[in-house]
Image: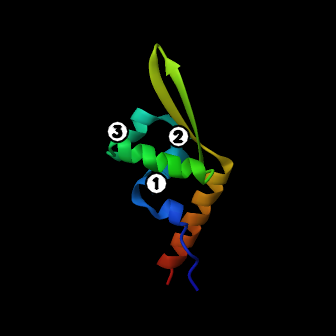
Amino acid sequence: MFKELDPILHAQLRLAVMSLLISVKEAEFTFIREKTNATAGNLSVQLQKLKEAGYIDVVKQFKDNYPQTSCKITPKGIEAFENYVIALQAYLKV
């Protein structure tokens, strides 16, 4: 009756990150950290899980001698997010 919710997206911080990236497509680590109120360590761990699932791409580079990490949602991530929302809506219709 109910579709299983994607366990990768069901975690609160990962869902917040994906919701943010759906709207902006790409964002820097500091922007995501500020918007989600997450600690740098926790956010790093959750971004790694999203990256391993293929939902986001993470690019690390240097800008003016400072490290810069950018995250971008992938087509697989967009599809997973859309499927998650559809599954969640099914729960609300009951």
Residue closest to the far right: 75
- The CA distance from mark 2 to mark 3 is 14 Å
- The CA distance from mark 1 to mark 2 is 15 Å
Residue at image location 44% in from the left, 35% down from the top: 29
The amino acid type of the residue labelled 1 equals: Arg
Q: Quadrant of residue 85?
A: bottom right
Q: Position of residue 44 (x, y in %)?
A: 43, 43
Q: Are marks 1 and 3 in contact (CB under 8 Å)?
A: no
Tag shown at residue 70:
none
Neighbor class of circle 3 (other Cα within 10 Å; few <14, some 14-19, many 20+) is: few
Q: Which of 15 and 39 lies nearest the eye of the viewer?
A: 39
Q: Position of residue 3 (x, y in %)?
A: 58, 77
- Colour scheme in use: rainbow
Q: Which of 22 and 41 lies nearest the eye of the viewer?
A: 41
Q: Which residue is mark 3?
A: 34
Q: Earlier in the sequence, mark 1 or mark 3?
A: 1
Q: Which of 87 and 53 lies nearest the eye of the viewer?
A: 53
Q: Nearer the viewer, mark 2 or mark 3?
A: 3
Q: Earlier in the sequence, mark 2 or mark 3?
A: 2
Q: Which residue is mark 2?
A: 24
Q: Position of residue 61 (x, y in %)?
A: 54, 24
Residue at image location 60% in from the left, 54% down from the top: 53
Q: Which residue is mark 1?
A: 14
Vertical relation: 1 (above or below) 77: below
Residue at image location 52% in from the left, 40% down from the top: 24
Neighbor class of circle 1 (other Cα within 10 Å; few <14, some 14-19, many 20+) is: many
The amino acid type of the residue labelled 3 equals: Glu
Q: Position of residue 74 (x, y in %)?
A: 64, 46
The amino acid type of the residue labelled 2 equals: Val
Q: Quadrant of the N terminus?
A: bottom right
